[in-house]
Amino acid sequence: MMANPIVAIVGRPNVGKSTLFNRIAGERISIVEDTPGVTRDRIYTHAEWLGKNFNLIDTGGIDMSDQPLTTQIREQAEVAIDEADVIVLVVDVQNGITDADEKVAQLLYRSNKPVVLAVNKVDNPERRSDIYDFYSLGLGEPYPVSSVHGIGLGDLLDAVIKNFPDTADNQKDDSIRFSLIGRPNVGKSSLVNAILGQQRVIVSDIAGTTRDAINTQFVADHRKFTMVDTAGIKKKGKLYENTERYALMRSMKAIDDSDVVLVVLNADEGIRDLDKHIAGYAHEAGKGVIIVVNKWDLIKNRDHRTMTDFTTLIRNEFQYLSYAPIIFVSAVTKQRLIKIPQLIEEVYDHARRRIKSSTLNDVLMDAIAANPTPSTNGKRLRVYYGTQVAVEPPTFVIFVNDPDLMHFSYERYLENRIREAFDFSGTPIHLIKRARK
């Protein structure tokens, strides 16, 4: 399994950078629709073009002005350069080349990273001849686009995916790959060290698929595991350590390279918005998820209700992760750490579970008999049959007379009945509605 390539969109304000980001995100084909309850902001997304999946990041913080680059602007540009596999520099045909464009272009040119130059706001075909001025930036062919109207997007994305790194991986890996993600100071590093210390047999350190990452293999209960390193940006300064944007970026790379994701919370600090942002990405990526509440030893005056109350809080704040098991641990006291590999293995197996069509349809028919399908404007939803079409996550196609008649609440009802019949704890499941032809 290889992490998806990262494409960063950079550029000064008012060139239409975020509009281009949203336009590409809107063109995505292979992404699950937005799920109610997922807290997210629009600085990252999964995207796909011609069968190539990638992560798209709107750097958003490169604020150019007439003054020389400030330290923060330069640092933010460097972070985008360091982390991305391909960089899209967005410029504006209406304003032509500015000093700010040239400064960013110089940074990108020195990076030796592939750069695709997008000349935005070419809404009128008569302006296409104006793009040739941008050759002087020294970044190769300029691609005319209109973020607002979607013009030129195909040619731009063709150029982007041509620059993706070779991800051929001939080495067979039969281990379960998992990562620990979370905001700073939740204790991820301590948990990593404690888990490895708990497991007596460490197989090897293997080079990670992301730059500067080392993935560690170990064996527990006769099953091989690979712990995916979430280390990414290793420079100093508040920008690298505390900015939510780049905490998310590091987490994205680890999530994409994992079968199971451990979302780590700090019991002593409670739940923060960034916790929900990061967990939401793991959910949308369709990965198996386990919620790990670390630093449980710091909770004073615990009684028989403390864990129950914290569990209720998690379920309320992470409603979209209702399927994820919760485990309360301490990296310091080693409390319950021995249970983590077994829990990862269970979630991994659930995500790969296949259900026979005949068995699935028995469950669907029983569910419909217990709670008949709804009617809309006198037209009743009819469910004909269902079949499983994929694993990781388990994905089911439900054939109906009219997909528009399947209300979200009834879809959720069917999902819950499937979960009651088959153990899919720890993994999302996807229901796809299709009209029977």
Image: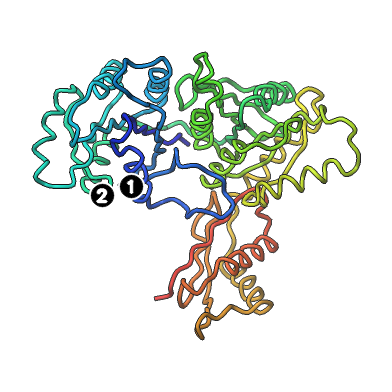
Q: Is residue 321 above or below residue 120?
A: below
For the point 66% across and 75% down, which residue is it?
A: 366
* Secondary element type, mark 1: helix
Apparent side of residue 120 relative to residue 345 in the rendered image (left or right): left
* Secondary element type, mark 2: loop
Which residue occupies the extreme front position in the image? 66
Q: Which mark is residue 243?
A: none
Which amino acid lies under the numbered mark 2 shown in the image of this protein?
Gly
Q: Is residue 321 above or below residue 194?
A: below
Q: Which mark is residue 23?
A: 1
For the point 45% across and 34% down, which residue is it?
A: 2
Q: Is residue 23 above or below residue 377?
A: above
Crowdedness of circle 2 by 10 Å Cα count: few (<14), some, many (20+)? Answer: some
For the point 24% across and 40% down, which residue is it?
A: 156
State the image coordinates of residue 242 (x, y, percent, origin top left). 56, 24
Q: Nearer the viewer, residue 158 or 8?
A: 8
The earlier-in-sequence mark between 1 and 2 is 1
For the point 31% across and 17% down, which residue is it?
A: 67
State the image coordinates of residue 391 (x, y, percent, origin top left). 53, 52
Apparent side of residue 257 relative to residue 5 in the rendered image (left or right): right
Location of the C terminus by quadrant is: bottom left
Q: Which residue is mark 2?
A: 150
